[in-house]
Image (tube, grey):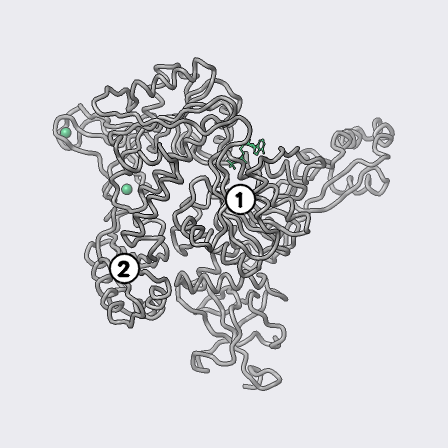
């Protein structure tokens, strides 16, 4: 009994976050021989869990156990002599688990690289780098006859005065040989992290442009230290990234690290190159394409402070930093910054919280800020900086609505749209047709009996992919060959209705020649390198008509692009989701922003059957800022976010009835809980796509004017839901501040 007490006689109980969906931690006794002083939250421990051993994170140390002493087991070993995570990150995880009402174990899982979850030490791989010395040239001659292969190796090194990493040196001599050459002073060796992950910064950073007046004014208002959150609202191409670069450089000069979050990295190789060319410190990039080993390396380099800058997608919000000095979120409005499966969180909101906890500045940048951030700026919680024009002679492109009513269309394009593409090509420039629908056609139907090719597992139609000869469901992984005849009536007249990017590409290739048309979407850009090849072709500047999905909407800087056609805007205008209008306005503005980024003026044509729609009218006349003003007024009047706070309780099951039954029982629980301020419950109702991947889905929406009331209710009622008998028949989850209701 004594061994579970420390010197002062109190019990030390480890509260351990384990990888399992239970809401709270598990209690253990410390490992044999481990004293209280050696224990700190943030260390990993291995514990027995049922018949298995698992690795968890020490979350807290408590004087009392919450289980009976008989059931208390002893942890097996402590993996880390000191905490793996710095205090600010531990606090962030604590806060996130509470705010998102999510099991702590899963929150920890999301924050740790896979190899750390498996118990590997937090250390990066050493890669040797070989350098020539002043003796190398002489050695070359001396060795030429006796050891020509060694002489050849020395010659290779002479071509690399900056050194050559072992990983980049195929056909290098064996380590023993290199060591012998080193002993003779003919080569020099340095060990360091993989230069593929953190290339050495340039000796002479790329030159920086002279700031515009607006940029200078914005920078002057941004503090170098202390917590402050600013929204940088700058039209596309106005030089926001240039401001990030200056701020990061200042931060590095103070000896601190900067963390920059972006929605997607694979789509913007230009940004990575720009940061690395300009900044005098190693830039580590954290994205989903990294292998486990590379991810751990980059994570450790950030934690040790070797990476001066970390650029990452949403999960990089959990990167530990030795000397944090600045946080930036680019495209802060983008839904990809929110994790929408499992542990659902907003990386932007978490980063702002973390900046406040650390007392450092955070900057949110966008050409089309979210209404949430705009409200915060309006009410003074965030500073608001604007960049209204592009530097130099580049101007925001002119926007024009094309009334499609009654017009003949070719593959969905009107005559003015085709004429715009034609004139771009004739001028040796590039044009972009934006259509956010992959595949050849969204519908395949039988002309004789009306049969529609529909997914059997989702409430969705198959998309017809002609080149692949397949029908694909874009909501699940279902793929099937295209039938030759109608499965219902045997007719051979199956027709493809509507346009996808593949059909548009085919049509334009016929009109302008295949060498003048380039489609960029997830189907043509499989794998990261393919996308880079496609983008390189665009950047080469040859006259081209690009056909693309939202993959082309974000961040790219195409100097020769002057015309943009937005092929179909109408679907979102009448969507049930209250955010559809905001998303459409953001997308139009972002796509439009690809045009005319240099001297040549740009033109944007928006095709619609609803040219009088107020959203489109405001957007064309007043731009995004005008749209946002109007949208905020509407949201306030309707009592919707950002003037209300939402949580969405989702349930799904193979059968139709259990999700609704569970949500009805949940609703009863919520209604009987004490409410400090009103929380409106809407539902249960079928989800907008009621069946997906073979599962029936239903929702219960919670809406409150006051965030605290919503969270108090969830705190009170949520823990009781798992015990409902109806819970056993469904999979359920909670989404706090959901980004879509889909
Ligand atoms: P954003 O991030 O707002 O889209 P960028 O920072 O990428 O804008 O700037 C758009 C283009 O303008 C880039 O090619 C950039 O190099 C250039 N640029 C930015 N600031 C200036 C400036 N002050 N003077 C000249 N060119 C600039
Ligand atoms: Zn038929
Ligand atoms: Zn499907």
Q: Residue at x 59, y 82 (%)?
A: 6
In the rendering, at what x and y percent does residue 415 appear? 30, 18
Is 555 displayed left or right of 344 in the figure?
right
Quadrant of ligand 3: it is top left
Q: Does 113 sit above or below residue 570?
A: below
- Check residue 267 in the rendering and tell me which mark sits there, or answer none: none
Q: Quadrant of the N terminus?
A: bottom right
Q: Is residue 95 visible?
A: yes
Residue found at x 38% / y 52%: 341
Q: Is residue 27 above or below residue 124?
A: below
Q: CA distance from mark 1 to mark 2?
A: 34 Å
Q: Is mark 1 within 8 Å of ligand 1?
A: no
Counting every numbered tag in the picture gives: 2
Regarding residue 33, the answer to whether it shows in the image is: no
> Any mark on residue 290, and which?
1
Place of residue 334 in the rendered image (x, y in percent of width and height, measured from the top left): 42, 44
Locate residue 220: give its quadrant: top right
From the viewer's side, name the closer residue of 10 and 53. 10
**Image position of 642 with respect to 495: above or below:** below
Residue that label 2 marks: 730
Question: Of helix, strand and loop, which one carries label 1?
Answer: loop
Pick whichever of labels 1 and 2 is earlier in the sequence: 1
Give the side of residue 593 with respect to residue 699, left or right: right
How packed mark 1 is, by other alpha carbons closer than 10 Å (few <14, some 14-19, many 20 or more), is: few
Is 126 on the left-hand or right-hand side of 521? right
């Amino acid at each position: 009994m004594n061994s579970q007490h420390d010197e002062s006689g109190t019990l030390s109980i480890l509260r351990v976050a384990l990888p399992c969906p239970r809401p709270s931690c598990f209690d253990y006794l410390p490992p044999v021989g481990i004293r209280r002083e050696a224990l700190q939250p943030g260390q990993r421990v291995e514990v027995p869990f049922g018949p298995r051993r698992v690795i968890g994170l020490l979350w807290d140390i408590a004087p009392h156990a919450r289980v009976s002493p008989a059931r208390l087991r002893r942890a097996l070993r402590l993996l880390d002599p000191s905490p793996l995570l710095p205090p600010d990150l531990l606090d962030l995880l604590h806060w996130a688990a509470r705010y998102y009402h999510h099991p702590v174990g899963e929150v920890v899982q999301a924050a740790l690289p896979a190899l750390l979850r498996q118990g590997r030490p937090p250390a990066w791989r050493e890669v040797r780098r070989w350098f020539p010395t002043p003796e190398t040239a002489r050695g070359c001659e001396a060795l030429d006859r006796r050891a020509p292969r060694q002489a050849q190796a020395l010659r290779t090194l002479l071509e690399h005065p900056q050194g050559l990493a072992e990983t980049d040196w195929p056909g290098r001599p064996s380590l023993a040989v290199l060591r012998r050459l080193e002993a003779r002073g003919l080569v020099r060796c340095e060990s360091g992290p993989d230069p593929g992950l953190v290339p050495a910064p340039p000796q002479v950073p790329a030159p920086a442009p002279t700031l515009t007046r607006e940029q200078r004014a914005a920078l002057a208002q941004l503090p170098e230290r202390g917590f402050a959150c600013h929204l940088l609202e700058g039209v596309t191409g106005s030089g926001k990234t240039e401001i990030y670069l200056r701020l990061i450089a200042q931060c590095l000069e103070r000896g601190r690290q900067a963390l920059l979050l972006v929605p997607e990295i694979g789509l913007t190789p230009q940004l990575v190159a720009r940061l690395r060319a300009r900044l005098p410190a190693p830039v580590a990039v954290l994205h989903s394409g990294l292998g486990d080993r590379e991810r751990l390396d980059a994570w450790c380099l950030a934690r040790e402070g070797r990476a001066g800058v970390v650029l990452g997608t949403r999960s990089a919000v959990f990167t530990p930093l030795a000397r944090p000095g600045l946080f930036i979120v680019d495209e802060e409005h983008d839904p990809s910054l929110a994790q929408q499966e499992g542990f659902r969180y907003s990386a932007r909101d978490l980063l702002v919280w973390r900046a406040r906890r650390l007392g450092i500045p955070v900057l949110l940048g966008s050409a089309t800020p979210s209404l949430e951030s705009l409200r915060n700026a309006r009410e003074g919680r965030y500073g608001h900086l604007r960049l209204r024009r592009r530097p130099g002679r580049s101007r925001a492109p002119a926007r024009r609505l094309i009334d499609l009513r009654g017009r003949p269309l070719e593959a969905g394009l009107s005559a003015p749209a085709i004429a715009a593409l034609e004139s771009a090509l004739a001028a040796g420039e590039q044009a972009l047709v934006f259509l956010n629908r992959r595949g050849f056609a969204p519908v395949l139907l039988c002309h004789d009996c009306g049969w529609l090719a529909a997914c059997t597992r989702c409430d969705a139609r198959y998309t017809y992919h002609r080149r692949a000869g397949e029908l694909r469901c874009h909501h699940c992984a279902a793929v099937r060959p295209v039938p030759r005849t109608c499965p219902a009536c045997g007719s051979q007249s199956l027709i493809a209705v509507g346009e996808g990017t593949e059909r548009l590409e085919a049509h334009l290739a016929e009109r302008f020649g295949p060498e003048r048309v380039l489609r960029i979407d997830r189907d043509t850009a499989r794998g990261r390198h393919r996308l880079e090849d496609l983008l390189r072709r665009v950047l080469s500047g040859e006259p081209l008509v690009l056909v693309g999905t939202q993959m082309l909407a974000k961040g790219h800087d195409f100097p020769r692009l002057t015309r943009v056609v937005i092929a179909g805007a109408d679907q979102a205008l009448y969507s049930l989701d209250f955010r559809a209008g905001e998303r459409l306005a953001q997308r139009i503005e972002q796509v439009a922003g690809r045009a005319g980024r240099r001297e040549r003026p740009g033109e944007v044509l928006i095709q619609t059957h609803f040219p009088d729609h107020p959203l489109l009218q405001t957007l064309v006349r007043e731009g995004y800022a005008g749209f946002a003003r109007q949208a905020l007024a509407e949201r306030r009047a309707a009592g919707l976010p950002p003037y209300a706070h939402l949580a969405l309780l989702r349930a799904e099951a193979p059968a139709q009835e259990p999700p609704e039954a569970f949500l009805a029982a949940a609703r009863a629980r919520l209604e009987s809980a004490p409410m400090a301020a009103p929380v409106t419950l809407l539902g249960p109702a079928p989800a907008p796509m009621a069946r997906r991947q073979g599962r029936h889905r239903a929702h219960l929406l919670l809406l409150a004017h006051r965030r605290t009331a919503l969270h108090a209710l969830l705190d009170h009622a949520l823990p009781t839901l798992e015990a409902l008998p109806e819970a056993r028949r469904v999979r359920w989850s909670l989404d706090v501040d959901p980004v879509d209701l889909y």
